[in-house]
Amino acid sequence: MILILSNKYDIAVDYVVRVLSKKKIDFLRINTEDLIDKKVSVSFPNFSYIITKKGMRYNLENRLQSVWFRRPGKPFEFTLEENRPRKSVITFVEDQWHAFIEGLKSIENVFWINDPDKNRAAENKIYQLKLAQKIGLQIPKTCITNDKEEIMNFLEQCGGKIVAKALYSPLIEEESKDYFIFTNIIESVKEIPECEFQLAPMIFQELLKEKVDYRLTIVGDECFPVKVVRESDRGVAEDWRIIKDGLKFVPCELPKDITDKCVEFVKKLGLVFGAIDLVKSFDKFYFLEINPNGEWAWLQKEAGLPIAETIVDYLVNGGIT
Ligand SMILES: Nc1ncnc2c1ncn2[C@@H]1O[C@H](COP(=O)(O)OP(=O)(O)OP(=O)(O)O)[C@@H](O)[C@H]1O
Ligand SMILES: [Mg+2]
């Protein structure tokens, strides 16, 4: 059996479920935020790992073949504010379910897309850049710091223009509104007080000029590259995520040397799936980052790429295709 762990709003899962159903493959989808409404039990000494859904008892210990660890939801995540318990209780409950879910790794001979531990490690951008460079991918000149003087020196080294981006999640969640840190171009930092930089390290990079963005989605050995262009087929000078209309994701070819290195990179991270952001600047490809659990449903829809089908193939064949 194939187990899918995600949340009820995950469209990528809907695509995969459609393929699994069409092919009549045995699977169980758990939207993990709903586990608080389900019955589960793990027993010893005769090891069993049971989840009950719609009155059916699934003993995963003897049935589980593959897990697609997508975006597990958290208990109470989608519960109305007034029906939620106290924050402390929520955290406690979340932690218990987290342990229950990750305990699935104790079931032997199961194929994971992706192993949650590897996902976590791969999310670190310093680790990513170091490994990408080691594999021979070109990376932009980079300085990760909270030191204003370092930033000023780096700015000068880079000819007076750099970009700044978040080292970890770019999301700032306020009570009334969420904020997202996009990539910003910086030409001067003199006027910004030192204490603002001091708060937390950020990534500063040389500005890649005349850039064209590429998103390379990888499933095992399969590569799905798309080029991010405007309607006019030009690349996007700024952070493409701020552009609301007229963006196209066009399936394309990348040099084999680049795709080979990216596939190797994903494997070295211990992942099966990875969504890599690349940039081409003056005929050179640069590695920007990998999202170990990046979004791809929109690529299946808009660019017609068979990513769901490929994920299903890997889940069914346990990585042997
Ligand atoms: N060194 C750079 N020079 C020019 N543009 C850049 C540079 N780094 C990132 N960008 C642009 O910023 C956008 C986001 O890039 P990137 O994926 O590196 O950012 P991020 O904040 O790490 O993203 P994520 O939120 O996906 O983790 C892309 O459009 C990319 O082209
Ligand atoms: Mg990105």
Image (spheres, helix red, strand yellow):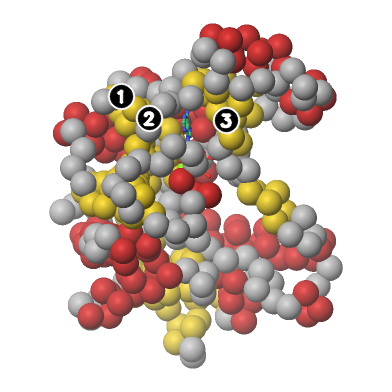
What secondary structure is marked by label 3? Answer: strand
Q: Residue at x 19, y 29 (%)?
A: 257
Q: Which residue is mark 1?
A: 282
Q: Is mark 1 within 8 Å of ligand 1?
A: no
Image coordinates of residue 246 in percent, x first then y, are 39, 57
Is residue 308 found left or right of 180 in the rendered image? left
Q: Is residue 243 visible?
A: yes
The answer to the question of whether label 2 and label 1 lie on touching residues, with beta carbons closer than 8 A, is yes
Res. 136 image quadrant: top left
Q: Disc 1 marks which amino acid? A: Phe
Tag on residue 210?
A: 2
* Separation of residues labelled 2 and 1 (CA atoms): 7 Å
The residue positioned farthest toward the bottom in the image shown: 55
Q: Quadrant of the C terminus?
A: bottom left
Q: Disc 3 marks which amino acid? A: Ile
* Separation of residues labelled 2 and 3 (CA atoms): 14 Å
